[in-house]
Amino acid sequence: MKEEVIERKRFALLLACNDSEHVKKVYGGYLDVFVRAFGDEDETWDLFRVVQGEFPRTEDLDRYDGFVVSGSPHDAYGDDDWILELCFLLRTLYAMQKRVLGICFGHQVLCRALGGHVGKACTGWELGIRKMIIVEGLQHCRFLQGFENLPSSASIIECHQDEVWELPVGAEVLAFSEKTAVEAFSIGEHILGIQGHPEYTKDILLDIIDRLTRNNSINCNFADDAKANVEGGEPDRIFWEKLCKGFLKSTC
């Protein structure tokens, strides 16, 4: 009697940044950060360093159950060759009805690729742990059905100076905040963008704040306020991880 072969789920991380020394030393790289947050046993996660021009082959795209686009220090509205190639890939995945989760830069570049507009945030840098307001009446989203009751708000780690200005046609706002009108959006059951970082731990953000201070991207007073905010609060990691895993792995 033949044994039933169960295929492992396969996901791709489209990494739009380079591993920092801190992340390499503490976690082994950003791939491990994402797998710790969103992965489960008996899954395969492949890494594509798109920031370095490494992309999955078109003929391999159908092998994947879902794709995650990471954050980046680059602007999602930039015209670097790899960003334009990433936009083309995202449009291809959208046409294939593949699940794509965009985080921070990934959230913004998803919006751009699918016809929306992004740019500099009028309120400047957002660094710290911030409360996002969850829009009411989202029960129709299948990837949220794992929640018996959705909270009215949830805190998340934020690290960005760009934002979504205008959503693509057909997109729906899922969350907003006092500073950012589009903190999360979805298109159907296969596109999800989140402005914050559900995968980050506090030490990763604190290291980024130190690096931004050293390269004069932010001043010391702003950095001290951001650090105080991080050290005095806690993101709702369990909520965000459950939401992201539900999106990537729920059945339509």
Image: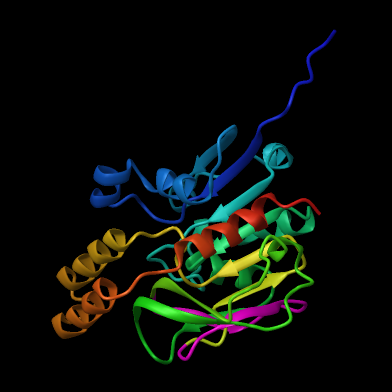
Specify whether 238 is left or right of 67: left
Residue 233: x and y in percent read 32, 74
Q: Is there any visible trace of residue 170 in the rendered image?
A: yes
Residue 251: x and y in percent read 77, 51
Nearest the camera: 228 or 92?
Answer: 228
Q: Residue at x 58, y 81 (%)?
A: 152
Give residue 176's quadrant in the image. bottom right
Q: Residue at x 65, y 56 (%)?
A: 246
Residue occupying the far right of the picture: 1
- Magenta stretch holds residue 176: yes
Residue 25: x and y in percent read 24, 43
Quarter containing the C terminus: bottom right
Nearest the camera: 29 or 58?
Answer: 29
The segment highlighted magenta reads 160-179
Give residue 100's quadrant in the image. bottom right
Residue 93: x and y in percent read 71, 54
Residue occupying the far top of the picture: 1
- Magenta stretch holds residue 111: no
Nearest the camera: 35 or 91?
Answer: 35
**69 over 113 or under it: above or below:** above
Q: Is there any visible trace of residue 85 in the rendered image?
A: no
Q: Residue at x 42, y 62 (%)?
A: 72
